[in-house]
Image (cartoon, coloured by chain):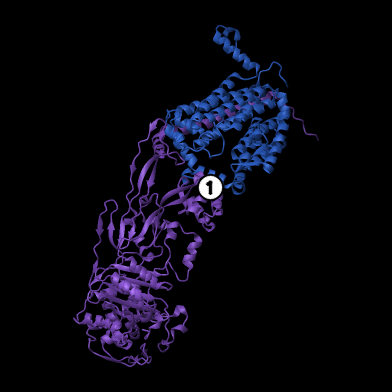
Amino acid sequence: MNYDALETSRTQRTFTGGARLLLALHLDGPLFIALCLVGGVGTIVLFSASGSSLEVLEAQLLRFGLGLLAMIVLAQIPPRLIRNISPWAYLTGLLLLLAVMLTGDVAMGAQRWLDLGVLRFQPSEMMKLAVPLACAWFLNDRPLPPSFTSLLVLVAAIGVPTLLIAEQPDLGTSLLVAAGGGMVVLLAGLRLRYILSVIGLLIPVALVAWQFLLHDYQKQRVLTFLDPRSDPLGAGYHIIQSQIAIGSGGVFGKGYLNGSQAQLQFLPERSTDFIFAVIGEEWGLIGLITVIALFMFVIGRALYLATTAHDTFSRLASGSLALTFCVYVSVNTGMVTGLLPVVGVPLPFISYGGTAMVTLMAGFGILMSLCAKRKLVGR
Amino acid sequence: MPRPVRIKDHQAEQHLFEQRALMAAVIMLVALGLVIARLVWLQVVRYDYFADLSQGNRIKIEPIPPNRGLILDRNGLPLATNIPSYQLELTREQVLDVDATLAGLAALGLLDSADVPNLKQEIRSRRSFDAVPIKLQLGAEELARFAARQHEYPGVEIRPRLTRHYPLGASSVHAIGYVGAISEDDKKILDMSAYAGTTLTGKSGVERAYEKELHGRAGFQQLLVNAQGRSVERIGTEAAHLERREAIAGNDLILTIDQRVQQTAEEALRGQRASVVAIDPANGDVIAFASTPAFDPNMFARGLSRSEYLTLTEDPNRPMFDRALRGVYPPGSTVKPLMALAGLEYGLVTSTQSVFCHGQYRMPGVRRPWRDWKPGGHGSVDLRKALATSCDVYFYDLANVMGIDRMHDYLEQFGLGKPTGIDIPGERAGILPSTQWKKQAFKSKEAQTWYPGETISVGIGQGYMSTTPLQLAHFTAVIAARGQRFQPRLVRAIRNVETGEIQQLPPKQLASATNRNPEAWDATIGGMYDVTNASYGTGRAMAAGAPYSVAGKSGTAQVFTVAANERMRKAGELAEHLRDHALFIAFAPIEAPKLAVAVVIENAPGGGSAYAGPIARRILDAYLLTPEQRARQDAGRKPVAPMATPANTE
């Protein structure tokens, strides 16, 4: 960008001033602005979805602020430090997961939380970042595409936390953790024959999982996904109600705060996992496409940034973070529209819920740090 | 040999990464493209469909259950009413853990833990936002106990409503019936839209037969609701325009039962497996309809726990069994007046012709004799005396001459062998045997053959013949009315609660029983008069001192077919359940009959005249005596033990 040519008016001066500040803070301008936009849209939608609750609004804004802070702080950490911390973060996370399994608090029937006195903490959230970072760290000094032995190590490194989290049980998070690690492997240039054989392996594994590993309610989710009308007031209720909400929104929507499905509380989990349906009902197809476009921009920009990173670790880690974000968006929109089974994956930055938001922002902070244009590039 | 060391090629890796990132971007585009395609499908193509669905979602139709009609006795005394009560309801989607909630309520003593599995199933089978009643009636103390802990049970609520209440408890239960929770079977026959919001329906007796009249029609109100079913007032800025239709209350029923007579009958039967049916011969009104032991129908309206239900059904005395309607007994000698009428009809006997009875009857070619109940015999008896002394030989002979099919054809006119058509469900038909009947009842060729010897037992109301107490009372009423027949009925009028208008139901007259012999009715009724009035009458003790004229007939029905020569065995030696049944039929006054009564006592320690006769008397007294006469009688009544009087066992 030619800054000199732009220095003509006060607005432009302010603009360039802002751009300089972002640059100084190692923040990517377009990504930063897009994230703020998504966060803004999310806050507006959440206000409606929560039944005009100012408390929820306040809490969400506070978390968004907290997330921004986390992002900015993490963006300042030198890539080398992040890389060196990665394996330790992973090990700590693994230990905490084990601790949760042994002592964790049970909230809503699932063992996910670790009570640290002041703070209740979900180690599985931390693993969403730690797993891809550790995988990237592992591959950093190794020639790519990775060898078979490296792959075995990676499969173990991803598989153990995934299973631990799936056992809590939290299918959504375990899926995202597995996706985070898997994306690293994929981006590292996994050979096509491995990809195919993994798909070949997945089928028997899925059968075994169905028989022995999945909880009844998880099986129910899959069955209901296949035929939501089989249980319209039980497990299929979510899917049917969310489709009604989206469908009845039409092209232009029913108007802000006027979605009857959401306002009259027919739509379950409307402020969390199913908030996408609220957008669809109140803002219509236009609103949804706008939101999807914003997300696509975020993902595209993050992927682009990843390609500009200077070392393997940075590339793999930031590429994986970008694609995990993409998994979030596609799984959530897929399940709300009835294309995928209902797994508890929130819509990033829009769904109400603290930890996920902060984790995501932290992820983008790390990505910005790894991909920032620095005067002295650390290798 | 050392493996060749692979060197990192940064250029190639960068390239590989870019390739993969591009691939990922394409996949992303495809995935989100699919989502957008799906959105277009939902929001553009299927918009109308989903817009309709979302409309239907917001307006909930809440039923307003109607008040059930009252049931009154013929004098307006309430037998079934409605009282306000509290019911415990559970709404699945508002409960965090249904199992724990039910267990907690059971621990509080509000539920019987034996019922919990059934309740769970019921809750699961209903829609998650439906409020499922888990306890129909909470006592004041239970209410307080729950109210103190209500905060621990989200999704469990107390709802006020009207419950059926039977102020007299077990009295008349077999006529009135009872209401209970609507079952799956009920749902098949009821118009469930009229039952929205109602948890109880008639299960037996009048409560079931007149369900349509009693129930009324549910109203509804539209509510603007959220998914929790909670009413909200407006949606966005739009105020709700909602419909409301009031419930139409069920109609009151006025029974034919006279509760005072009913009570007398129940008191007289107390402690025995027995039944009484009393009918007004002039119109078929059932004045008393008692079966003991009985049960408290309030238990069902309250919601019976599993253990209570088992206690009731496993009681060997079967309190739930309606003996008056469904008990089938050999009529024994009570059938003899009908036999007399049949003999006169066919001209096989006359009122004056005598038969000599020397204690047994022999059929040509059969070695084994049929014995009379009186070992020495009755000597020379004409028709009236044969009835009065209950001479078996006279009727053995008559039956033999008549033959089973002629007997069947004549007795059929009196309603034997088929339901009387009383206006409550479940009536049994009994058996009026004939050669035709035997062909249908048995499979093997051999068993289908009718043997002449079998006719002889039927002539004294034994053998294959069986009747219900209702049929006994019915044919007694037909004799009293000299052939005029009315269908027995329990409901005589229906009162519309909305308008207060009373619709009298006309008595239903049936084809009359006829007799070609003009003397037949006088002779037969005269014989029945002698039963209770002549010095040799088997039932003379029961009519002693009655201020009205009484005609009657005793009967003793064999339960256990002992050889004829062992019939005289003392009743006390037999096991209780093998003892004979004691029967008595009677009507009064003879000139203008007002009441016909049938009494059946299962496995009585003695015969019909001794055990059933005095009970028939008490019922006649209760209905026929003026209040002054009753007062006088009550004052002078000595405690009469039925065992003190018997001279005869028949």
Residue B324 appears in the figure:
no
- Number of marks in the rendered image: 1
Residue B593 appears in the figure:
yes
Give the image location of residue B72, x and y in percent. 32, 60
Give the image location of residue B588, x and y in percent. 27, 75
Tell me the element at label 1: helix
The answer to which of B618 and B367 lies nearer the viewer is B618
Q: Would you place residue B206 above or below residue B381 in this image?
A: above
The answer to which of B390 and B501 lies nearer the viewer is B501
Q: Which residue lies furthest to the left in this view?
A: B518
Give the image location of residue B235, x and y in percent. 41, 33
**Quadrant (top left, top right, bottom left, bottom right) of the C terminus of chain B:** bottom left
* Badge 1: residue crowd in 10 Å (few <14, some 14–19, many ≥20): few
Give the image location of residue B396, x and y in percent. 32, 86
In this image, B69 relative to B231: left or right? left
The quarter holding residue B557 reads bottom left
Q: Would you place residue B608 above or below residue B368 in this image?
A: above
Q: Residue furthest right?
A: B1
- Say which chain tag 1 marks: B
Q: Mark 1 highlights which residue? A: B148
The answer to which of A80 and B590 lies nearer the viewer is B590
The answer to which of A147 and B583 lies nearer the viewer is B583
Amino acid under disc 1: Ala
The quarter holding residue B277 reads bottom left
Q: Supply the letter of whichever chain is purple.
A: B
**Quadrant (top left, top right, bottom left, bottom right) of the N terminus of chain B:** top right
In this image, B252 relative to B642: left or right? left
Q: Colour of chain A?
A: blue
Q: Would you place residue A319 above or below residue B649 in this image?
A: above
Q: Would you place residue B309 above or below residue B103 in this image?
A: below
